[in-house]
Structures are given as structure tokens and as C-alpha cells.
Amino acid sequence: MSIPFDLPADDHTLSPRTGYTRAHWEAVADGLLTAAWRRATPGGALLHLPGRPSRSGVRSDGLEGYARTFLAAAFRVAGAHGDDPHHLLERYADGLAAGTRTPGRDDTESWPEIHDVDVQGQPMVESASVALGLRLTAPWLWEKLDPAVQDRAEAWLRGALRHTPAPNNWYLFPYTVAGFLDSVGRGDAETAAARERARDLLESWYRGDGWYADGDGRAFDHYNGWALHLYPVLDAHLAGDTDALAHHGGRLRAHLDGLSLMFGADGAPLHFGRSLTYRFAASAAVSLGAVTGHTPLTPGASRRIASGALRHFLDRGALTSEGLLSLGWYGPHEASLQEYSGPASPYWASKAFVALLAPADHALWTDTEEPAPVEEADRVLSLPGPGLLLQATRADGTVRLHNHGSDHVRPHEGESAADDPHYGRLAYSTRTGPTARANAADNHLSVEVNGRASVRRRIHPLGAGHGDGWGWAASWHRPVFVAGPPMVPGLRAESVTVALGSLELRVHRVVGAPPGSRVTLTGWATGPEEPTVSALHGLYGWDDPAPEPVPAPQGTAWTPWARVPRLTGGCGGTTVHVALACLTTGPDAPPLERAVTDVRVDGGTVELTWTRDGSRTRVSFEPPEVRHTRP
């Protein structure tokens, strides 16, 4: 699809895979900012972009437009050592002066005040972008402001230090505000307390493998890269704090071992978790690693991933005819959104422009593009910390994530019966999105009791591991029900995924099901006109090994209409159910009915042989264990 502003000609010598260079990144930033500023108030304090309002209201949405675009402008100007050909900082300086003159007033320009998360919390989120933008551009903006405007800005920002954030990555917003105030000589005991509190929480949320939980529960998603790593690493980098940078940077390096495998050959990030309308912000951590030197990737591979993600969305309709980022994935897509999503929310994509902090002579821009990890070889990688299993196939450039550890259920919620398509599914990919809540669920194991189907919410990891070309992850969950009693005493579903090449062995044990219960398993949701093929085949415990196609009329982020393959079978007491699934592109989908032989189920143990190489897999539930041996 056409991009509504000019870009430089592609350079396939320097960037053989994407054609994008640093000049493309600058041009995209300029185009996005130009389009957004057409919707600014006269004083420039609020950018009211078109679209449905968020639950926070129109004024907060206008502040969001100012703050999130300011972040892109700040990366753009700071990376050019203050060169500001479009006079962006003048606009943001004027907007800062107008917005902080009478905060909370119901007029054309005034910013909303910052309060607790449950009162008027969204401005706290935006305060971090304002503070970070001011810190990045301090020599050219902050230091030239009238002292009275500086004082007003500080007074507004301190609202973030004096009110309660959401119990997750939000604590990094006052941390970032405090870091800015410290950097301009306005730090005190209040800023020190905000930073210490955030550091302590961040340590308590670290789960290993470079992954943080987003709060005290088990939420693992793109917030790791664009928030939980970005803020502390960038803070240490800007402060020149070598000890903090070594600590946080080491974790970023470990995170990028897995995150770098979460982008498909077409540039798409995994469609997994919330706030997916931030789109190419998913590459922010990759670029930050290159900027700070804390990355396992070469500069050429880093640019390949970041530019691939940027181009992926620009080429697929993420921009409106005005040059604005729409609320959705490619074009508008309601099912990808949350209640807090407003017209300017997609501009957290500005975080991807952290890449511009690398100057023009940096290897991130001068080295030739190299393949992304998915383009080099088939890989299977387990991440025991978050309970995730990654499966990438070079032939079709597809990455799949098997979720055995991320649920986004907050500790105080207990077992929630509300289905969450962004976390509750067994698998996600760079080629498919989950079906909408009201449609048949893809990649889902459901137990039906008295005609009521269960959903998967709180996930309990049971382990994960990988070997040469294969890997596994396991978990259990308590099936919960929206209608009627929320749960059946003693009912439990245990799940194991084994990945080998493009094949997925899915083994489930249902424990404590009442007599006459049913179990269903679904595969990947795809559209009839898509090149992506979804296959599912029953091996044990199903009425029929051949799945039935179930329609999902709301489609996914990829297709306006989808179908989902589904297996069904009876269960009662303790039963085992085994299936093969596959998601591939093109006509070479492997025939699942011939992919394995000699399937044996004995109590809580499943054994089978793979026809491709004669290797044998043994899955046990007591205790959870997977063995894979080659002849």
C-alpha cells in the first residue's frame, strides 16, 4: 500500500533485505510528526487525533498525542546532535508552556493533572514520555525555556511522583520523571524515593532468561522490550552510569537472545499480548541493544530486524491517508485494542525511533544488513523463566510462540472466567492473530461440562527445555467457566507442547472431569484466501482424527474472516488427548496423518516415533518430563 509521504529510494546494496537506511527512519519520523501536528491545538499543547476516545477521555487523549509524538521528535533531534530542520522543538516548547500554564482547567490547551491510576491515571503514563523527551533534548529545549516554564513543568511532572501507579511497568514512569529531574539539577529525596521503589520492584519481577513479569503476576509480552528494559537501560545510558548499565544491559542482552527470534522473515513481530497497536515499537529493545552495545546481535542483524518491523507495517496499511497511525494492526482492527486505547495510543511506536540515537556513522547504519535469526536456520528455543517456547522455520520465515507461562491474571483476581485472547491461547505466531472473544477460540483446549465450555486463564508452568532442533514446554490450568459455577472442584488440565521442525505435538491430560464431559482442541485460525495453512490431526483421545472447520466470522488481524480446525472427544475422570498441529505457508504443508507412527499411551505417558528421522518422543506427566531421542 502507498505511504502518504515521501521516502528516499531503497538502498538494496547497504540494506539488501529491507532497502531501508537511516534516512528512511528520519523520513518516517518526519512524516508521522507532520501528519500528527496538523491536529494540534493553537498553542500546541494537545494533539487531538481522529478516532474513538479512550476511557480516559478526550483531553487525556490530546496529551497522549503531544507526549508520544514528542518522544519521536526527541529521538530524531537528539540523534542528529540538535539539528532540527523542521523546528520541531519550538513547537514542543510552546506546547509545554501552554499545557502547564493552568493544569486541570477545562480550556483549549491545559493538560490534565496527574492523579492515581484509578482516578485519572493516564497522564502519569504520558509524563514519562514528556520527561524522557525533555531529557534527550535538554541542551536545545529545556535549557532555553523561561525559568517560570521550567518550574511549571517540574510541578506538573511531580504529580507522577506523588500518586499511585498501576501495579506493573507504570512504576517506571515516575522513575523516568525522577531521572529527568535529577539530570537537570532538580532532584531531591522525593525523586530518590521514586527511583528506589521502581528499582526494588523491577528486581522482584525478574524471572530469568532476560524476562521480567509485568507486575507481581505472570504477564510476559512486548512490554518487556518497550518498557521494562527500555526505561532503565536508557536511563543508565543517558546518565553514564556504568554500573547500572552493566546490570540492566546484561539482562537486555539475555532478553534479546529470545526476542530477536520473535520476528518473522517478513518483519512481523509476534501477535501476542496487549497493546499490539504500538506495532513496530516491538523492535525498540533490539535498537537499544545496538545503541548501548548490550546485544548478542551484529549491527547488521539489528538493523534488519528493526527496519523489517518498520517496513512491515508501513507496507501493509498501518497509516491512514493522512499519514496517521490507525488503531489496529495493519489497518483498523477493534479486536486488537484495549479500553485504554485512544487515537494517539499507537504513537508509543515512537519508541522504535530510539534507533536514531545511533549517529549516522554508527555500525547500526553503516554495516550491511545481515539475516534475522529466523532467516538463518530452523530453531526451537525454550525460555523457562517466562514459560515460553519459540519455534521458527526458515523455509517460510514463520515464528510460533507456545504459551505455557504468560496469563496477565493479576494476583488479587484469583481464577478469572473472562477469556483473554491476547494471553489465554496455547500458541501465537507472526502470521496469525487470535480470534475475537465472541468467536471460536483458536489454539485452545476447552473442557465442556453440562454444555458449558471452559476458558484458560491462570497458567501454572511445569517446565521447559530444548535440544538440537527440538524443544518443549508444559503447564497446567484450572478450567474456569463464564456461565454457572466458575469451576468444577478437582478439575485440572495439563498441557505439553513439543516442537520439531514445523510440527507441534500437543499432549493434554484432563484430570477430575465429571462423567459425560467433553473436550475440544483447536488449531491455528487462518483465512480462506491466505497463503498460510493450518492443519490439525488427532492421534489419541478424539472422536475423529480429522478436524472439523469452525468459522470465526470476526476474523483476525490478518483476515476479515477465518476458520479454525477443531477436534472433539469425550472425557471423564482422567483422560489423555494427543494431537499434531502445523502452521505453514505454501503448498508444502506436511501431511500430519503420516508424520508419526507407533503412538502409545499408557496412563500418564505418551510415546511416539517421528517418520521424518525415526526419532522418538516420550512425554510423561508424573512428573512432567519430555525425552526426545534419535536412532
Image (tube, helix red, strand yellow):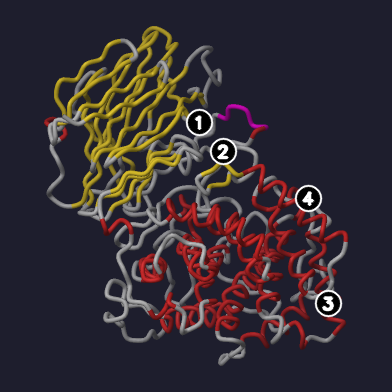
Residue bearing the label numbered 3: 101
Residue bearing the label numbered 4: 164
Query: Closer to the observer: label 2 or label 3?
Result: 2
Mark 1 to mark 3: distance in Å? 48 Å
Q: Are marks 4 and 1 in contact (CB under 8 Å)?
A: no
Q: Residue 359, relative to residue 469: is it above or below?
A: below
Residue name at image x 66 percent, y 68 percent: 129
Q: Are marks 2 and 1 in contact (CB under 8 Å)?
A: yes
Residue bearing the label numbered 1: 459
Q: Quadrant of the N terminus?
A: bottom left
Q: Which of the marked residues, 4 or 1, is nearer the chain's N terminus?
A: 4
- Inspect the image, locate mark 1, and give the three-letter code of the amino acid beneath it: Ile
- Inspect the image, locate mark 3, and give the three-letter code of the amino acid beneath it: Arg
Q: Position of residue 247 (x, y in %)?
A: 62, 56
Residue name at image x 48 percent, y 15 percent: 491
Mark 2 to mark 1: distance in Å? 8 Å
The answer to whether 499 appears left or right of 350 in the picture is left
**Which residue is at the front of the view, 56 or 234?**
234
Residue bearing the label numbered 2: 218
Q: Which of the marked residues, 1 or 3, is nearer the chain's N terminus?
A: 3
Q: Residue 19, relative to residue 516: is it above or below?
A: below
The answer to whether 113 appears left or right of 577 in the picture is right
Q: Which of the marked residues, 3 or 4, is nearer the chain's N terminus?
A: 3
- Label 2 sits on a secondary structure element that is loop
Density class for disc 2 (Cα within 10 Å; few <14, some 14-19, many ≥20) is many
Q: Which of the marked residues, 2 or 1, is nearer the chain's N terminus?
A: 2
Mark 4 to mark 1: distance in Å? 28 Å
- Inspect the image, locate mark 2, and give the three-letter code of the amino acid beneath it: Arg
Q: Position of residue 548 (x, y in %)?
A: 23, 31
**Which residue is at the front of the view, 302 or 576?**
302
- Inspect the image, locate mark 4, and give the three-letter code of the amino acid beneath it: Thr
